[in-house]
Amino acid sequence: SGAKVVVVGGGYGGATAAKYVRLFSDHGVQVTLVEPNAAFVSCPISNLVIQGSKTLADITTPYDNLAKRHGVKIVRDRVASIDPDKRTVKLAGGAELPYDRLILSPGIDFMWDSLPGMAKPGAQDKVLHAWKAGAQTVALRQQLEAMPDGGVYALSIPQAPYRCPPGPYERACMVANYFKKAKPRSKVVIFDANDDIQSKKGLFMKAWKEHYDGMIDYRPKHKVVDVDAATNTLKFEFNDDFKAAVANVVPNMRAGEIAVKTGLATANGRWCEVDFLTFESKAHKNLHVLGDAIQIAPGMPKSGHMANQHGKTCAAAVVSLLAGKAPPSLPIYANTCYSFVTDEDVVHVASVHRYDADKKTMLPVPGAGGVSVAASELEGRYAHAWARNIWADSLA
Ligand code: FAD
């Protein structure tokens, strides 16, 4: 058809959507992917870079194959603004791209306003989130390496919903795993803004007891309201200040800034509501949003696996709509999130989600999915295979 699709963001959702629009249209639809980063860096497995058994290179995949094998045009730039009426995007570099349909998978951005001290010069380079894989992942590893034995690493978890519900508890395991080997007098303190552990609770608590007894201190209902980066001090709504040797603060999140400023974050000003058959935004026609940026359906995690499934569902719908056909009517997708509890042992949570035509949303299929019976090395091998497969599916 020669129709034009522009994809914003080459993460789990956007890269998958770009590739599958080309595949599902037999290369008939022109796809341009706009992404500022030179290569894809994966958040899944990034906690192993912090633990020390993987490097940034191990979790990095180039965009070349999307261009060479699938004919996706890659533009290395950032989308500065979108005009949904004119159907154009404007790049930071100044160029303007027209589209018939736009697919936006910008991930998350942090709500820095809720932590005033983090606006001070240098604060965000000192107190890290490492919740977008890349330079901060490596910098957090370096802070842990530089920390003297006997120091305290404090991790603060934002209010749900946030990117990757089990991710913080995995990170606590990986930091404790490094301490156990290299700095055995050190401690991990987790401050969770939520009332309880958000995912795989029994499995994480068992791992903390079995492998890191006395090393990991979990404190629920601790909402960080400010940070003094100069002294690595966390300030809470109700509890005493806490000074750490390394403070790792993961702030509250919302949809990536470009989605918010385009007026797509219609749920509490934070997340983008979509039609789950097409991922078309409820705020604007011809504009689709997927991945972590959306207002999730019940039981749906903000995960890379989900973003990949959104990408395929959205790609199929976009190709149908551009051809003047109805989109596929009953999407079903699966999710598995693996978490490392030691450098080899892993636990998983899995779910299956099906479109409910009456409720017009995705719902978990009862009886499908569940969690590991126990952590195992076999699941460790599955976790590495999952990562290799999803990187290949999204990017190769
Ligand atoms: P992203 O993958 O973040 O991609 C967004 C992209 O958009 C980025 O490349 C960004 O540069 C680009 N972008 C943003 N704004 C613009 C703009 N204006 N113009 C152009 N480009 C733009 N998920 C799992 O399934 N399994 C796991 O084991 C797992 N582990 C995790 C562990 C950690 C520590 C973390 C932090 C996350 C983990 N996740 C996991 C979650 C997973 O990383 C996210 O859910 C996933 O990345 C979401 O994909 P996305 O496409 O929405 O966003």
Image (cartoon, helix red, strand yellow):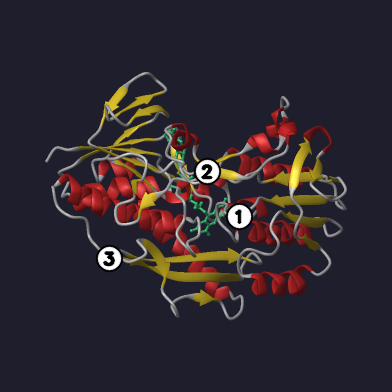
Does residue 308 sit above or below 96 in this rendering? below
Drawn side of residue 205 relative to residue 349, left or right: right
Q: Amino acid at mark 1?
A: Ala
**Residue identifier under label 3:** 330
Sequence order check, earlier mark of 3 and 2: 2
Write down the quadrant of residue 164 in the picture: bottom right
Secondary structure beneath label 1: loop
Secondary structure beneath label 3: loop
**Residue identifier under label 1:** 160
Q: Which residue is pictured at 37% across the width and 18% down the height?
A: 94
Residue 342 place in picture, x, y as percent: 66, 66
Q: Amino acid at mark 2?
A: Arg
Q: Amino acid at mark 3?
A: Leu
Q: Are marks 2 and 1 in contact (CB under 8 Å)?
A: no
Does residue 22 sit above or below 361 in this rendering? above
* Crowdedness near tag 2: few (<14), some (14–19) or many (≥20) residues, C-alpha within 10 Å: many
Drawn side of residue 234 relative to residue 105, left or right: right
Q: Are marks 1 and 3 in contact (CB under 8 Å)?
A: no
Sequence order check, earlier mark of 1 and 3: 1
Q: Residue furthest top?
A: 94
Secondary structure beneath label 2: loop
Mark number, residue 270: 2
Q: Which residue is pictured at 84% across the width and 67% down the height?
A: 214
Write down the quadrant of residue 167 in the picture: bottom right
Q: CA distance from mark 2 to mark 1?
A: 12 Å
Residue 186 place in picture, x, y as percent: 84, 56
Residue 47 place in picture, x, y as percent: 61, 54
Q: Say if disc 2 is inside 8 Å of ligand 1.
A: no
In what quadrant of the picture does the N terminus appear?
A: top left
Drawn side of residue 216 relative to residue 139, left or right: right
Q: Nearer the viewer, residue 365 or 8?
A: 365
* Crowdedness near tag 3: few (<14), some (14–19) or many (≥20) residues, C-alpha within 10 Å: some
